[in-house]
Amino acid sequence: MPAIPSPPPADGTGDVETAAAAVTAAQRALHTARHDLAAAIHAARHAGQPVHRIAAHAGLDPVAVRNILAVPTAKSAGQNF
């Protein structure tokens, strides 16, 4: 027989804990998405795509693309994570 979940505390801390867990999950997802975007931008540039075209496809400003390209990837820096 499955356990019956206990009701959240009356002091509202259950809501705070739930919200904090959601924020942590969102931060992890954002970090992953930023990493994937940076990898895709580096790959596109390595394939010869011009910055303005990469920016247009990504919905970014060319300056933002150049800033992303200015940060070396872990692979190009010789780091293995």
Image (tube, rainbow, N blue to C red):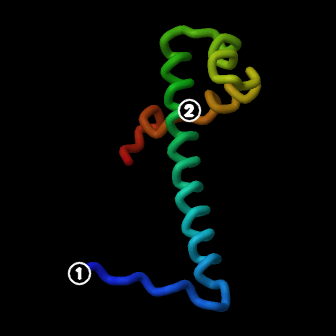
The CA distance from mark 2 to mark 1 is 48 Å
Q: Position of residue 68 (x, y in %)?
A: 64, 32
For the residue marked with disc 1, what is the amino acid? Met
For this rendering, which residue is in front, 15 or 21?
A: 15
In the rendered view, tell whether residue 69 sits above or below residue 51: below
In the rendered view, tell whether residue 24 sits above or below residue 71: below
Q: Residue at x 64, y 23 (%)?
A: 58
Label 1: how many Cα within 10 Å (few below 14, some 14–19, many 20+): few
For the residue marked with disc 2, what is the amino acid? Ala
The mark closer to the camera, 2 or 1, is: 1
Q: Residue at x 42, y 35 (%)?
A: 75
| Quarter occupied by residue 3 | bottom left
Q: Which residue matches tag 2?
A: 38
Q: Which residue matches tag 1?
A: 1
For this rendering, which residue is in front, 5 or 58?
A: 5
In the rendered structure, are the residues bearing label 2 and label 1 in contact, judged by CB atoms less than 8 Å apart? no
Number of marks present in the image shown: 2
Q: Residue at x 63, y 84 (%)?
A: 13
Q: Position of residue 41 (x, y in %)?
A: 56, 24
